[in-house]
Amino acid sequence: MGATPTSSLKPSPTAFMIDLDGTMVDTLGDFVAVLAQVLDELGLPRVSRDFVELTIGQGSEHLIRSVLKEVGGPQHAYEAAWSLYQRHYAVLNGQHADVFPGVEEGLRGLRALGLPMACLTNKPAAFARELLKRKGLEGYFDQVFGGDDFERKKPDPLPLLKTCEALGSALATTWMVGDSSNDARAAHAAGCPVALVSYGYNHGQPIREVPANLYLDRLDQLIQLV
């Protein structure tokens, strides 16, 4: 299933859940800069930008463990790496990141509809909320949930189930908007419709190979369909 924007959203939305990294904000540069500092302090070689792009999206813990494995670092260095990562990310958060074209226009249009909206990301909640604030996007959302707000992360459906509960919206009419198979798998498992953007981080795989209700080249294309 899947289509480019043509007529109207089916099913008609009653709320939206929108991913952050790769969907609203291009944060690849942040991850690259933070990991470079972490690895430098651990005396380990840096990873390539391409590796980071293929690895992000499943939470910071997964990213750090994958990076340590990639550079041949011992897994017992994880705790030290995690501590350094948190410290450096808090400082660099948003400094090497840009809001994707069409995002602010899209959020403004969706907000004008009066439907509940949540930012739902695997990024740690504190970093997510601070990034939204630094990029001037926090005011669009009724709820912001990060990867450490629930027991499990996307692609598990639990974060979507809990977010719909917080928004007071039905699963079948709450659209998940994301950039990767993680978002799609979580939405399918939760029974939510899903729209995927074409410009994000899908682990190196073409986004249109991921089953979805809709594919978008810009977030503001949604406004034409609601």
Image (tube, rainbow, N blue to C red):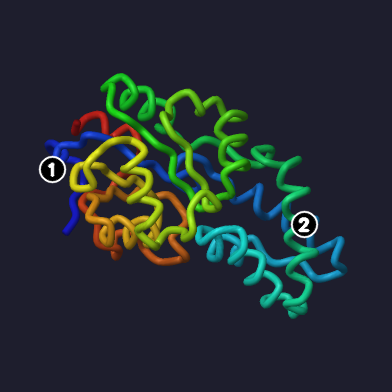
Q: Which residue is mark 2?
A: 83
181 to 171, vertically: above or below: below
Helix, strand or loop at label 1? It is loop
Q: Residues within 10 Å of mark 1 (few under 14, many from 20)?
A: few
- Relative to residue 204, is residue 16 depicted above or below? above
Q: Residues within 10 Å of mark 2 (few under 14, many from 20)?
A: few
The image shows residue 187 at horizontal and vertical percentages of: 30, 55
Real-space Cα separation, disc 1 to disc 2, in angstroms: 44 Å
Quadrant in which the N terminus appears: bottom left
Kind of residue sitting beneath label 2: Ser
- Quarter residue 217 falls in: top left
Please name the residue shown 42% across and 49% down the image.
199
Residue 94 rendering spot, x and y as whole percentages: 64, 38
Q: Quadrant of the C terminus?
A: top left
Image quarter of residue 114: top left
User: Which residue in the structure is indicated by mark 1?
Assistant: 10
The answer to which of 67 and 156 lies nearer the viewer is: 156
| Residue 47 placement: quadrant | bottom right
